[in-house]
Image (tube, rainbow, N blue to C red):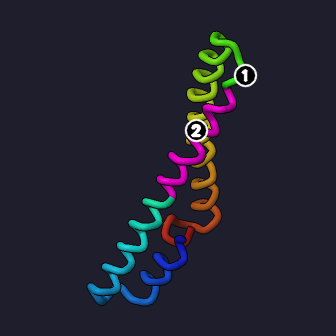
Amino acid sequence: LAFPFFSSIFVGLDSPRQLRIAVTFGMIQTLLSKTTKYALFDPTTQMAYIPLDEESKVKGKAAIEVIGSRIGKSGGSLIQQILVLGFGNIINA
């Protein structure tokens, strides 16, 4: 889904019509990704806790949400820093 967005940007930003098309593709991409996340991913993660007892559910959810969130953000930042260091600057990465 990102291909139409970025290709319309690379084709030319000098035209307001093409910029509007690029923004529209970006909006559609964001809407589809968020919809998919909330419709499929979030319920699936909650289903993983069904077989556990109540105390394990609470502890498991808290641990995974706190630790998983921090590890995910740290991992994303690490990947971004590696790309910036590898390519020289943020524009080339």
Q: Helix or strand or loop: what does disc 1 sit on?
A: loop
Q: Nearer the viewer, residue 40 or 18?
A: 40
Query: Mark 2 = which residue?
Result: 43
Expressed as whole percent of the image width and height from the top left, the position of residue 74 reads 59, 41
Q: Is residue 73 magenta?
A: no
Quick check: 91 left or right of 59?
left
In this rendering, the answer to whether 35 lies above or below 61 is below
Expressed as whole percent of the image width and height from the top left, the position of residue 73 reads 56, 41
The boundaries of the magenta stretch are: 33-49
Q: Residues within 10 Å of mark 1 (few under 14, many from 20)?
A: few
In this rendering, the answer to whether 79 lies above or below 52 is below
Q: Is residue 36 magenta?
A: yes
In this rendering, the answer to whether 89 lies above or below 60 is below
Q: Nearer the viewer, residue 19 or 37?
A: 37
- Residue closest to the far top: 55
Of labels 1 and 2, earlier in sequence is 2
Expressed as whole percent of the image width and height from the top left, the position of residue 92 reads 54, 72
Alpha-carbon distance for marks 1 and 2? 15 Å
Residue 66: quarter of image: top right
- Residue closest to the far right: 51
| Number of numbered discs visible in the structure rendering | 2
Three-letter code for the amino acid on which mark 1 is drawn: Pro
At 42% from the left edge and 73% from the top edge, which residue is drawn? 25
- Residue closest to the far left: 16
Q: Where is the N terminus found, in terms of image quarters?
A: bottom right
Query: Mark 1 = which residue?
Result: 51
CB atoms at circles 1 and 2 under 8 Å apart? no
Q: Nearer the viewer, residue 55 or 78?
A: 55
At 68% from the left edge and 14% from the top edge, which residue is drawn? 56
Quick check: 76 left or right of 6?
right
Quick check: 33 left or right of 58?
left
Residue 12: quarter of image: bottom left
